[in-house]
C-alpha cells in the first residue's frame, strides 16, 4: 500500500471510530408514558365518567389509576377504557374485610388492573407503634389474597407515616414487617417530600420495591402548597434518574385540589412529556 493510500485509510478509520463514539453517547431519557390518578378529576368523573376519560386521552395520557368507578360495572369500565385507548394498571381500594376484598379483586381482574393499592390507614388505627405492626400483618394478609388472584398489592403513603413514635419511623416499621414481594410501594413524591424525607433514600434502601409513584408538585415549605407538576420545587430530574433502581413502571400525576382540573392536568402532562433527565 502506498503512503498516500495508507494515510487516507487510517484517516477514514479514525473518522469511523469518532462517529461511532458519538453515536454511542448517552441520550437524555424521557417518560415513555404518563398516567393520572383519577382522584384529581373526581368531580368531573362523577358528572361525566366517559367524557372525562375521553378528555384525559385527548390530552395525551396513556394510563389512569382509579379511585372509584362511580356505579359503573367492571365490564363497562373496561369497554370505555378500550374505546379511548387507555390502560388502567392500578386502582385504589381500601381493605375492609375478606369478602369485600375478594369482590374488589374480582373487579380488578375484569378491568385489567395489575396493582391494587391501599390508599390510606384510618387515624384511629395508627395511634401506636403496635397499631402499625398489626397493620403490617393486615397488609401481608390482603397482599397474599391479591397475589393468589394474580394482582400485586401496594401501599400509598401520605406524610403521617414519618413522624417518629417511640424513636421509630412508622413507615419503616411497616416496611420492615411486610413481605417486600407481596407488599410493594406507591410512593407519593409530594407527601414524602412534605414529610421532610428524601425518596431516593427509600429507593436505595428498598430497590425494586417501588413500581408506582404519584407525581405532584410542592411550592415548598412551610405550607407546601400543591401546584401543577413543574411549577414547584421538587427536583424531578434527580428523582426520575433513579427510576430503574426504584423499579418504577408507572407515573401517575395527581393534584388533590386543582383550581382548574383539565387545565392543570394538561399543564402537568405537557411538562412531564417534554422533561429530559
Image (cartoon, grey):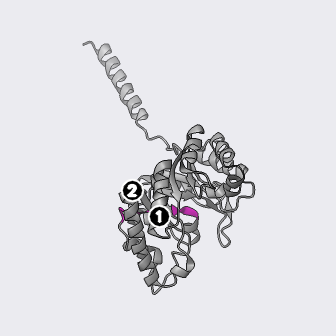
Element marked by disc 1: helix
Determine if residue 230 is in view.
yes
Tell me what residue is drawn at x 40 percent, y 56 percent. 245
Q: Earlier in the sequence, mark 2 or mark 1?
A: 1
Residue 23 forms part of the magenta stretch: no
Dot 1, how many residues are within 10 Å of its Cα: few (below 14), some (14-19), or many (20+)?
A: some
The residue closer to the viewer here, 165 or 71, is 71
Q: Is residue 185 left or right of residue 92?
A: left
Q: Is residue 45 left or right of residue 23?
A: right
Tell me what residue is drawn at x 52 percent, y 70 percent. 197
Quadrant of the rendered image containing residue 216: bottom right
Quadrant of the rendered image containing residue 133: bottom left
Task: Measuring from the top left, give residue 94's x and y in whole percent.
Answer: 52, 66
Q: Is residue 251 left or right of residue 220?
A: left
User: In which quadrant of the rendered image does the N terminus lie?
Assistant: top left
Work out how far the residue at label 2 is from the one at label 1, CA to CA, in angstroms: 11 Å
The residue closer to the viewer here, 157 or 22, is 157
Residue with the most extreme bottom position: 166
Mark sitting on residue 243: none
Range of residues picked out in magenta = 180-190
Residue with the most extreme left position: 1
Mark sitting on residue 149: 2
Q: Is residue 44 left or right of residue 130?
A: right
The residue closer to the viewer here, 221 or 111, is 111
Determine if residue 241 is in view.
no
Compared to residue 91, the image places residue 137 above or below, namely below
Task: Measuring from the top left, give residue 48's x and y in whole percent.
Answer: 70, 49
Task: Measuring from the top left, give residue 224's x and y in whole percent.
Answer: 65, 68
Mark sitting on residue 101: 1
Amino acid at each position: 500500500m502506498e503512503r498516500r493510500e495508507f494515510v487516507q485509510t487510517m484517516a477514514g478509520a479514525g473518522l469511523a471510530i469518532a462517529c461511532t463514539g458519538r453515536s454511542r453517547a448517552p441520550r437524555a431519557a424521557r417518560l415513555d408514558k404518563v398516567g393520572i390518578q383519577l382522584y384529581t378529576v373526581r368531580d368531573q368523573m362523577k358528572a361525566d365518567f366517559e367524557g372525562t376519560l375521553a378528555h384525559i386521552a385527548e390530552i395525551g395520557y396513556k394510563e389512569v389509576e382509579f379511585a372509584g368507578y362511580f356505579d359503573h360495572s367492571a365490564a363497562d369500565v373496561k369497554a370505555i377504557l378500550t374505546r379511548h385507548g387507555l390502560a388502567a394498571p392500578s386502582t385504589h381500594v381500601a381493605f375492609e374485610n375478606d369478602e369485600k376484598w375478594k369482590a374488589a379483586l374480582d373487579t380488578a381482574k375484569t378491568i385489567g388492573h395489575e396493582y391494587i393499592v391501599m390508599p390510606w390507614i384510618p387515624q384511629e388505627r395508627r395511634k401506636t407503634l403496635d397499631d402499625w405492626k398489626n397493620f403490617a400483618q393486615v397488609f401481608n394478609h390482603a397482599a397474599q389474597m391479591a397475589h393468589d388472584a394474580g394482582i400485586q398489592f401496594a401501599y400509598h403513603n401520605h406524610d403521617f407515616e414519618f413522624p417518629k413514635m417511640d424513636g421509630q419511623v412508622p413507615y419503616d416499621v411497616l416496611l420492615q414487617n411486610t413481605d417486600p414481594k407481596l407488599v410493594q410501594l406507591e410512593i407519593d413524591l409530594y407527601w414524602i417530600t412534605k414529610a421532610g424525607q428524601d425518596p431516593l433514600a427509600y429507593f436505595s434502601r428498598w430497590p425494586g420495591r417501588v413500581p408506582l409513584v404519584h407525581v405532584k408538585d410542592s411550592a415548598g415549605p412551610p405550607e407546601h402548597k400543591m401546584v401543577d407538576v413543574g411549577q414547584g420545587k421538587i427536583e424531578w430530574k434527580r428523582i426520575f434518574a433513579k427510576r430503574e433502581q426504584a423499579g418504577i413502571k408507572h407515573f401517575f400525576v395527581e393534584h388533590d385540589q386543582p383550581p382548574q382540573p383539565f387545565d392543570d392536568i394538561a399543564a402537568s402532562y405537557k411538562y412531564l412529556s417534554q422533561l429530559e433527565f
